[in-house]
Amino acid sequence: MSFANAVLAVLVDGPQHGYAVHGALRSLLAGVRPVNHGQVYATLERLAREALVTRGVDPSGGATFALTPDGRRALERWLERALGCASPDGELPARLALLAAEGDLPGAARLVAEQRTRCAALERVLATRPDDLVREAALRHVAAERAWLALVEQALCGGAGPICD
């Protein structure tokens, strides 16, 4: 997962202090990846140099960071980019967590549907492969991912699906 993109996602709702960005990331990415203060501030400074965020000062003199239009476009491109099959520490769980936190159910629905399509495509490729341990592992991974995607739908839709009809 791109940590910089997760930082951009946290800034979607408006300017925040680095400490608030750190807290939001710790909450959103709990169990997905660790978040340390130094990485957050270094990433914010790099994003500012790249003009993806602006650095400002609040009335009390504290530094704040805000998303720029270029930053918003970079985040949108990241959220829309196709992925391979997910792993527990990969981008898909993080993207879905961020979309859910933002209340973007249509975005989460698109991502789940795209992931199901990729799983089906991988299954078709695997069907042409000879029976071996790699094929078996991949098929089991795809089956587990499909089951996980069903759980995602239930969590986002309160038991309804496919992705809230």
Image: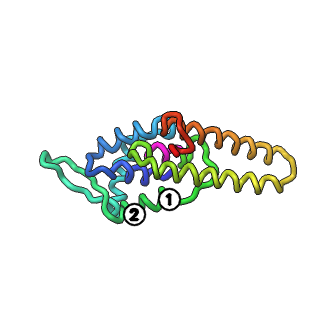
Q: Nearer the viewer, residue 99 or 60?
A: 99
Instruction: Give the Cα separation between the discs numbered 1 and 2.
Output: 11 Å
The magenta stretch is: 93-98
Residue 44: percent from the left, percent from the top?
A: 34, 53
Other-residue count near label 2 (Cα within 10 Å), few / some / many at <14 / 14–19 / ≥20: few
Magenta highlight: main SS: helix
Horizontally, is 21 left or right of 114 in the view? left
Q: Name the residue at the front extreme.
A: 165
The amino acid sitting under disc 1 is Glu
Look at mark 1 in the image and give the residue it sits on.
80
Write the residue at 69% across / 52% down: 120
Write the residue at 75% across / 45% down: 139
The amino acid sitting under disc 2 is Arg
Horizontally, is 67 left or right of 76 in the view? left
Horizontally, is 97 left or right of 61 in the view? right
Write the residue at 15% across / 48% down: 61
Residue 116: percent from the left, percent from the top?
A: 63, 50
Residue 55: percent from the left, percent from the top?
A: 25, 57
The count of marks equals: 2
Q: How is the image coloured?
A: rainbow
Horizontally, is 7 left or right of 136 in the view? left
Image quadrant where residue 118 sits: bottom right
Residue 18 located within the stretch drawn in magenta: no
Element at badge 1?
Answer: helix
Q: Earlier in the sequence, mark 1 or mark 2?
A: 2
Query: Relative to 80, is 159 above or below?
Result: above
Q: Which of 102 and 161 is in front in this view?
A: 161
Element at badge 2?
Answer: helix
Other-residue count near label 1 (Cα within 10 Å), few / some / many at <14 / 14–19 / ≥20: few
Look at mark 2 in the image and give the residue it sits on.
73
User: Which numbered disc covers residue 50?
Assistant: none
Write the residue at 42% across / 40% down: 28
